[in-house]
Amino acid sequence: MKMKTAALPAALTLIFLLASCGMSKAGIESRVAAEFQQSLDGDDDLSGYGMEVKSVSLVKTGSNAYDGYVTVALDGESHNIGITVTTDADDILLETDPFAFSFLAEKALENLFDW
């Protein structure tokens, strides 16, 4: 399997349009999970892996800020992707941690060398 450098972004930034004013933490987690899955499925470099979002866990760190992680499944294994979420009345900005998808490089090496 040929792996593109873009499949391992140092930071993946997505803007999700939604009215988050007054939305509960559970509501934000649910919306982030749905939008993150849609982004994985729609990304040319990531969609071929067939990752599935299993859960989102957030902790409020400020009046409109959250830190946490998205748990994705890949070939029966779970991987946590660290995220930072900022909300306002209209948008959610989600940023992944640097090297958040580095586990894909390991997976590519396993496939390349048939480990």
Image (spheres, helix red, strand yellow):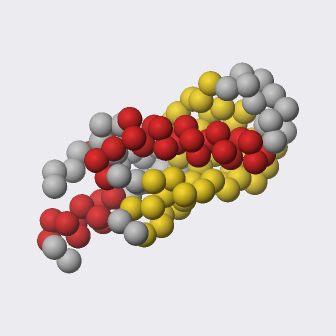
Q: Name the residue: 64% across, 39% down.
A: 31
Give residue 23's quadrant in the image.
Answer: top right
Q: Name the residue: 71% across, 53% down.
A: 58
Q: Is residue 77 rendered to the left or right of residue 24?
A: left
In which quadrant of the rendered image does the N terminus lie? bottom left
Number of numbered discs overlaid on the protein picture: 0
Q: Name the residue: 16% across, 73% down.
A: 114
Residue 111, x across and y down, in percent: 19, 66
Residue 59, x across and y down, in percent: 75, 54
Q: Is residue 98 rendered to the left or right of residue 25?
A: left
**Residue toward you, 26 or 7:** 26
In which quadrant of the rendered image does the C terminus lie? bottom left
Decide if residue 82 is in sight here.
Answer: no
Give residue 91's quadrant in the image.
Answer: top right
Residue 61, x across and y down, in percent: 79, 49
Q: Name the residue: 53% across, 46% down.
A: 96
Q: Residue furthest bottom?
A: 115
Q: Is residue 101 above or below residue 115?
A: above
Q: Is residue 106 above or below residue 13?
A: below
Residue 76, x across and y down, in percent: 40, 69
